[in-house]
Amino acid sequence: MLRDITLGQYYNTSSPLHEMDPRTKIIGVIVYMAVLFMASSLWEYMLAALFTAFLIKISKVPLGFITRGLKPLAVIMCFTLALNLFMTGTGNELFRWWIFRITDDGIVLAVKMAVRLVFLVMGTSLLTLTTSPIALTGGIERLLSPLRRFGVPSHEIAMMMSIALRFIPTLMEETDKIIKAQTSRGADFESGNLIQRVKAMVPILVPLFVGAFRRAEELAMAMECRCYNGGEGRTSLRELKFRRVDAMALTAGILLVSAMTALKLLKNGGLI
């Protein structure tokens, strides 16, 4: 399951999404998230689904590779589904047992939240899958650069975020190696009750934290040896420039928001 985590990984290929300016993709992700939280009707979710399918198609990233990132979130999705299913008190009651009750509004809300979470993971995964860590760092830094006049260290924040994303796959791979090493020594992580399973995780967490601190120390030493001094006076090897594909992407985002707003107005007017 650890290998199924795609967040932070970069899929190296040639596609329109890979060629976009990272600032465009970061803004696009923010707009995409806003659109998902705006969606409430079936037509709006269908529009979001078509737009997500279009993004996956032009990214040239295999659909199986993207959906693989949903497996580690299965527990969170099931918890979210159950929470909305049993905790919604409005609507017609369909089933009741003890303190739990299921209503038609609860079913609709649970399905909407599950679909929204799936689209959210798939859409945001495209940001890291189509953007290299260096380009992502540059994009975040440029977007935060206006905050420098208020004393916000934009370069340091961008560097920390990109390093965190970059080390997610590394830590997952190291965790997988530790689990296999402990299993070969007779460790059992599957049997027993919840408390026993939590105790069995200690031999995994201790070397994982030790390895993480060791990697952080080695990275800090390497940056210090290369005279890294933050964003003051630094230049970029590749200057970010908006191109035609970025203008097309921003136009598509504006059209998506406009279409979502139009559908919402039509719904409020009782036309759909």
Image (tube, rainbow, N blue to C red):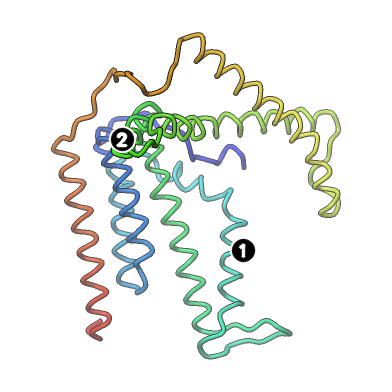
**Residue ID at (25%, 32%):** 19
Between residue 132 and residue 181, name the one nearer to us: 132
* Residue 213 x/y as whole percent: 66, 25
* Dot 2 and dot 1 residues touching (CB under 8 Å): no
Callout 1 crowding tier (Cα within 10 Å): few <14, some 14–19, many ≥20: few
Q: How many marks?
A: 2
* Residue 59 x/y as whole percent: 31, 40
Nearest to N terminus: mark 2 or mark 1: 1
Callout 2 crowding tier (Cα within 10 Å): few <14, some 14–19, many ≥20: some
* Residue 203 x/y as whole percent: 80, 34
Residue that label 2 marks = 145
What's the mark number on residue 104?
A: none
Give above or below for 133 relative to 91.
Answer: above
Q: CA distance from mark 2 to mark 1?
A: 39 Å
Kindly identify the amino acid type of the residue bearing the numbered disc 2. Answer: Ser
* Quarter of the image where the C terminus is located: bottom left
Give above or below for 235 relative to 95.
Answer: above
Horizontally, residue 255 falls left or right of residue 9, namely left
Horizontally, residue 100 falls left or right of residue 228, namely right
Quarter location, residue 228: top left
Q: Nearer the viewer, mark 2 or mark 1?
A: 2
Residue that label 1 marks = 79
